[in-house]
Image (cartoon, helix red, strand yellow):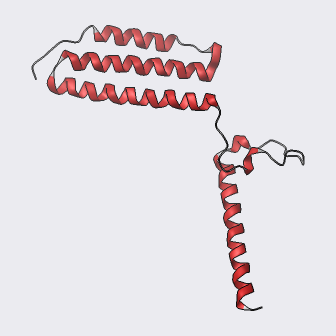
Amino acid sequence: MDKTNTWLIRVFAAVLICVCLIAYLNSQKNPSLLPSKPSIEGLEYKAFLLRPKPSIEDLEYKALDKKRVNAEFAANRDYADYSKFGSIIFCNASFNSRIESANYSKQMELYISGKEADLSEWDNAIKDYVNERSKCRDFNP
């Protein structure tokens, strides 16, 4: 064979290997997308898609998780400021952020479990945070 044909065969083989590798890694990343028994009619199942379109519930859950993480970060930051400066403002802000984080966690639990969700743990946590917030006092560092 001449050099051009050899070069074309090597490029085609490299592209084929890359496509197979991407499909394999995608199926390992999202194993729930694979059907239990693939059939000839189901050749268009989601494993062949590189990026399956997320559902609205997934997007809302991820948005709540992001808000929860941000609220926890704000609570930790405000508590560090309270420890440093001793102002009641930072203490109240910290516990308000913890209450907000618990509310987001409660909503996430509703998405996961639906109507059967046991929210008493989150309700107790919110009550505890409200009680602790009432104990905030100014102090001199």
Q: Residue furthest front?
A: 4
The image quarter containing residue 101 is top left
Which residue occupies 23% across, 12% down? 136
Residue 75 x, y percent position in the rendering: 32, 25
Q: Assign the N terminus to one quadrant of the image.
A: bottom right
Q: Is residue 103 above or below residue 15?
A: above
Q: Is residue 138 above or below residue 10?
A: above
Q: Assign the C terminus to one quadrant of the image.
A: top left
Q: Is residue 112 above or below residue 52?
A: above
- Is residue 79 or residue 43 the one in the foreground? 43
Q: Is residue 34 above or below residue 108?
A: below
* Residue 33 placement, left or right of 90: right
* Residue 2 placement, left or right of 83: right
Q: Residue furthest bottom?
A: 2
Residue 6 x, y percent position in the rendering: 72, 85
Which residue occupies 88% across, 46% down? 39
- Is residue 70 or residue 82 the one in the foreground? 70
